[in-house]
Image (cartoon, rainbow, N blue to C red):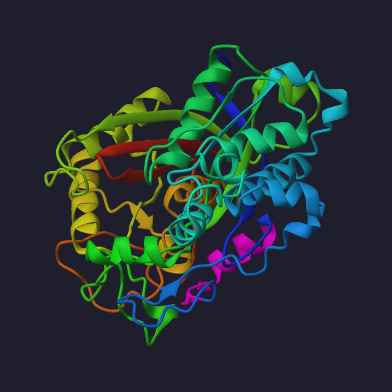
Amino acid sequence: MDRNRAVVVTGIGVFTSIGCNRADFWNSLITGKSGIKKIQSFDPAGHKSQIGSEVLEYKPENYFDRKESRKMARVSQLATSAAIEAVKDAGLDLNNEDRTRIGSVIGSAAGDPINMEDQLIRFLKMGPGSVNPLTVPRVISNMPVCNAAMFLGLHGPTLGISAACTTGTHSIGVALGLLRLGMADVILAGGAESTMTPYVLDGYASMGVLSTFNEEPERASRPFDLNRNGFVIGEGACVMVLETVEHAEKRGAKTLALLTGFGMTTDAYAIAAPEPNGIWAAAAMQIAVKDAGLNPDDIGYINMHGTSTKVNDKTETIAIRKAFGNRNIAVSSNKSMIGHALGAAGAIEAAATVLSVHYGILPPTINYETKDPECDLDVIPNFARTVKIEAAISNSFGFGGQNGVLVFEKA
């Protein structure tokens, strides 16, 4: 390990449809529990896709008083709550820290479409002067990270990243770079998303990317399966505490895993479709592995982007073959259980990768029934696998050709 380049992960705060803390989230992942149900945030009748992965157990009143909660959109509440839980999980006493040396990089792909949609409807009905004055501070995409920093009193580097479905991954990768540059000792990094509105659901459905297995929600997300027909929209948040090795050792922190590499490329191909030969996705994996000072053979597991769409799963398979050859490397997709949390997905899946390395258990890809010859990978079908691995990568690929890959190693 190069102490000047490695960063340690010491805490995780996570809110998903299968768990609102690290332990519950992990136990649900390794037991193959699905959190996908018929949408409850609104009546989805008439929509092509009527299912989602909602964080139904989350209660903002457990973290904020009414005044604080009113100022924040749900996406900011989730982000801030995840940051609070991450700090707690890391055993980080902020009162004993120099808060100018603690930063936050938490992204959101969409910001807050819930209030935007609600206030637009209000404006169209009632006209000028009717919009809530808190609308703009709620909807802009940097507010999740700003609210987290304000609530915790953090004065170090603060950045809100928006990179489509790669947002959470890019946030963690940028945090790694800031720590390597010496701009902070600790950074809270991750992503948050809450886009459960009729307008957003219909927007994705009109693109033909959402699953329509409405009668069997828990079986709808089926990455790599021959009969997959789209992803399931989700929400959630995950924030990880990242520290320099020196800072973590000085305070005697526990270490869940090392964050040692980051790779980032752009397809520059299409607004939604991935480059079909997987060239730049493969390059992102290769860059990340090289950045970590590893060889491709050192990687024992890949937490795939694995959306459950025909094109993306096929293209990611091609990219993995380009990056790792014909090795029968173990891969799986958490989206089979938690759907696609968009800007939060990369952070949630990075946390799952950290825990896979830490515990030596690889979560399954559930709902895998029929092999697709174009996705000929070891997808860990339906049941978790106990395997001691030294290093793993987490992939994220987003609209606009955004590619991001993180490398985690066993502490």
Whole-percent x, y for residue 263 in the image: 36, 30
The answer to whether residue 53 of the structure is visible from this angle is: yes
**179 w.r.t. 270: above or below:** above
What is the magenta range?
Answer: 23-39
**76 w.r.t. 4: above or below:** below
| Residue at image location 51% in from the left, 34% down from the top | 172
The answer to which of 314 and 191 lies nearer the viewer is: 191
Whole-percent x, y for residue 41 in the image: 54, 71
Whole-percent x, y for residue 35 in the image: 52, 72
Q: Is residue 12 magenta?
A: no
Q: Quadrant of residue 397?
A: top left
Does residue 219 appear to the left or right of 85 in the view shown? left
| Residue at image location 32% in from the left, 81% down from the top | 213
Whole-percent x, y for residue 269 in the image: 14, 38
Q: Pick the quarter of the image with the N terminus.
A: top right
Q: Is residue 33 magenta?
A: yes
| Residue at image location 63% in from the left, 64% down from the top | 19
Does residue 153 appear to the left or right of 353 in the view shown? right
**12 w.r.t. 92: above or below:** below
| Residue at image location 44% in from the left, 79% down from the top | 218
